[in-house]
Amino acid sequence: MRIVLLGEQATGKSSLLVALYGALVNHRAGELQLVRTVDEVQFLSRGLQAFGRRESVQRTDLDSDARLVIEVARGEQIVGVELPDRSGELLKHMLDSRVWETDLQRQIGLASGAMLFLRADLAVPDAGSDAFAEPLEPAGEDPAQPAVEAVAWTPGVMPADARTVDLLQAVLDAHADRLPLAIILSAWDRVSPPAAAPAAWLAERMPLLEQFLGTHAQRLPRAVFGVSAQGGDFAAGLDDGLIAQDPWDRAFAVRPDEARGTLSEPVLWLLDNAG
Amino acid sequence: MDEGPQALDPGARLFGADPLNADEASGLLAQGPGRLVVWMGEPGCGKTTLTTQLYERQRHTGQPTRFAGSRTLLAFERLAHPRRPRSGEPAPPAPRSAIDPEGREILHIALIAGELRVHLLLSELPSEIFRQLADNQLSTAGIPLLRRGDKLALLIDGGALCDNDTRAAVLTRARQVIERLLADPAPHPGTELALVVTKWDLIAADAGAMAYWQPREEQLLAEFRRLDPAAPHLRVAAGAPAGYRGDDGFAALRSWLLAPGPRPADPPIAPWDWPLDAPPRLRRPRRRAPA
């Protein structure tokens, strides 16, 4: 099964891959059992070492082709899973330049499922990422005002909800078939105030995206997961209880039914829902 | 893992930040029910604000409609961006409506109300064309957009009604346009009309403006309904401040826009040319082809 990862920079893609690999290797992935690692995993090993030191995963240019290719067992079933980790910078460049990035286009065309990454700790209530809490100013309609460009607008200044809808509209154009979508709300441990249900968080914080997903449920069936790949905020410092735990025991995912599970939950859902 | 089939289109482009042209808008109408909406009114009456708000309000919770996509998402974003409050900076002016030399003047938003998915196609009659129509320098026959529009809204600038120096001119302009529409065989019988008073929050807060407007509103509405006896009269405060306690009228406006009209099917939108005598200063410079 090919799973395409969709997310801009620092949305938690690499952290999830590292933590998922750590959970699989250390038998903390619930129903999923690692059968075989297909590719080299230097990037993932280095990331796990960083998690052990309570440091975040840092990507380098050398990691541009990083991916996790494994065979996993679920009960009697053995499944190949490929998760290529593309740099979020490439996606940002694609959305800004308005030209498809060829490799991503190919991955989307081949994928039977997708993970969409959003930062749960950055979006503010009832808004995109731009604190849209007040009505719009009726700007620029005074006939005395000159016809000037207000600010240097680029696609790069769009709030996260609009950028994500923009991306998904492009995905719908590129992928003719149904594409199950596991939505990963990363840094879930840092959501303030704490939220119980990831889907409710999405509906409250990104209504435009949630409406769009709801109106394309046939083409993009989805489930929303809260994920903490690190298990806590390294910059703020972990409490002693978490420090004593291994990285794969600190990490967790909150399922759509609000139950806490392992990082394998989004993969399990995609396996269940891929055609 | 095998490579499988691929359908790559190297260099394929994503949707840009420009509005749609008539052909692209017609393509959307072929996919499902649509409404071509035409705002017309004086400069500064709120045409762009209404268009932008139809998108921007979907970014809030609790909307009666659901957002189902937009082929002009970036164009909406470009319009909304300078109007979003940010860190105390004054809102800079938005680009003024002008004639696009490539005919890209339609914004698109797909909304779902109940089970009904509707493609709203939003366009503005350029302010100068509106003035030329009012001044009888143009006939309605020279403005094909008026004949094809499914929903035609005449906007009355509520802000101008609060000003002793401008209120009479606003009223006169509205009556001139009504007279022009009555005189010519346009709009099309399938076109629905509405009289929309914008910036209603300003009138509601100004006793003098209210006293001026109320008796004239009834007269004007009666005159307007000679065009369309079923035309609604809407008071809209789309840009009202957060503390505004009155009905901002936006739900009623949106319901009118989404309601099905008398046309049994959506005919394509024919490309239109604005009259050749439109002042050159209205025309945006033609885009240069990318190098």
Image (cartoon, rainbow, N blue to C red):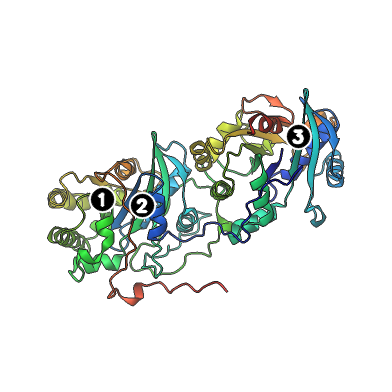
| Residue B193 point in image, percent of width and height | 23, 50
Quarter of the image holding residue A268? top right
Query: Do tags 1 and 2 sit on the same chain?
Result: yes
Residue placed under numbered mark 3 in the picture: A231
Relative to A114, B234 lies left or right? left
Vertical side of B179 occupied by A134: above or below: above
- For the C terminus of chain B, the quadrant is bottom right
Q: Identify the residue at image location x=74%, y=47%.
A: A85
User: How busy is the neighbourhood of tag 3: few (under 14 within 10 Å), some, or many (20 plus)?
Assistant: many
Q: Secondary structure at mark 1?
A: strand
State left or right for residue B159 relative to residue A271: left
Could you say which is closer to the camera, residue B241 or residue A6? A6
Marks 1 and 2 sit apart, C-alpha to C-alpha, by 11 Å
- Which mark identifies residue B196? 1
- Mark 1 packing: few (<14 Cα in 10 Å), some, or many (20+)? many
**In the displayed structure, does residue B280 sit left or right of residue B87?**
left
Determine the residue positioned at 45% across, 58% down. Answer: B79
